[in-house]
Amino acid sequence: MPLLFKLHNYASLIRFTHTVFALPFALASVALAWPSHPVTLRSLVWILIAMISARSAAMAFNRLADRKFDALNPRTQQWELPQGTVKVWEAVLLTLASSVVFVYAAYQLNFVCFVLSPVALAIVFFYSLTKRFTWASHLFLGLALSLAPMGAWLAVSGSPIDLPELATPFFLGLAVLFWLAGFDVIYSLQDHAFDRQEGLHSIPVRFGVAGALRFSSFFHICTVIFLAAVGLSAQMGVIYWLGFVIIAIILFWEHRLVTPTDLSRINRAFFDFNAYVSIGYLLTTVADLFLMTGSGIGR
């Protein structure tokens, strides 16, 4: 059916399946906030809508910003905008509509989220421009996704903001920032020759393949440190720390898959292993909180 085909193209354009990266961390943040800030079903629904719409707007804008390069890059020439299966005006409309939905969802949550929603959009849109002038673009992408757990906490807590309790979502946001930057560096290895040719900036272009993998390892060490900080600040129990150990092992193994002499397993390291990290973190965090109460989340 034409409508289903078009919806499939839109979902492919924004890589809807990659929602598995940021969304679990946003939900984990909600779970961590729940003991102090019980969440209604209505709030949870609007958080989900805000997350999905913000990411859709960011991805559609990214495809628009990069469409010239995507049409030249052999790896991306079959994507929707270069192939014309999604028109430029459709991507523009999708960006605008998703942005409006995000701002409205933020309005439905609380005043703090509503006021900060344009700032969040500016940050996630700005990332798409950074590889034109800085090799630290991976960190800007990490910053964009780090807004998910921090925004989810603010959506639950509202105002007035209790600054001391923001330590937990702040640490979780930093963990997401470095986690995302780490695996984005690995993913960008596929394009380092093309990026260098086109004058685009990235860690692989600036520091080479081996140097980029060292940066990625350092970023993931930072991820482990900040996930530990979350556990300590939230006074988590044994299940959380078991999940923490498993996640550290997964990240370590991810760096065993990709080496300077063997880049053939980049896609597996990028998607499979990092999906295990995000979903595993959510499940073990919720399970730990549930165990500590014996009958649900909340102390």
Image (spheres, grey):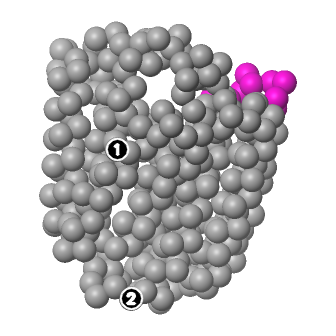
- Where does the magenta region start and end? 257-267
Number of marks in the rendered image = 2
The numbered mark at residue 162 is: 2
Toward which corner of the image does residue 284 lie, by quadrant?
bottom right
Q: What residue occupies the far right of the structure in this picture?
A: 261
Q: Nearer the viewer, residue 188 or 276?
A: 188
For the point 24% across and 28% down, the residue is 91
Residue 34 visible in the picture: yes
Toward which corner of the image does residue 249 lie, by quadrant?
bottom right
**Quarter of the N terminus within the rendering:** top left
Instruction: Tell me the element at label 1.
Output: helix
Instruction: Tell me the element at label 2.
Output: loop
Q: Indicate the amino acid at tag 2.
A: Asp
136 inside magenta stretch: no
Q: Indicate the amino acid at tag 1.
A: Phe
Q: Main secondary structure of the magenta part?
A: loop
Q: Which residue is mark 1?
A: 125
Q: Marks 2 and 1, how far apart in space?
A: 29 Å
Query: Residue 51 in the image: x percent, y percent?
Result: 33, 54
265 inside magenta stretch: yes
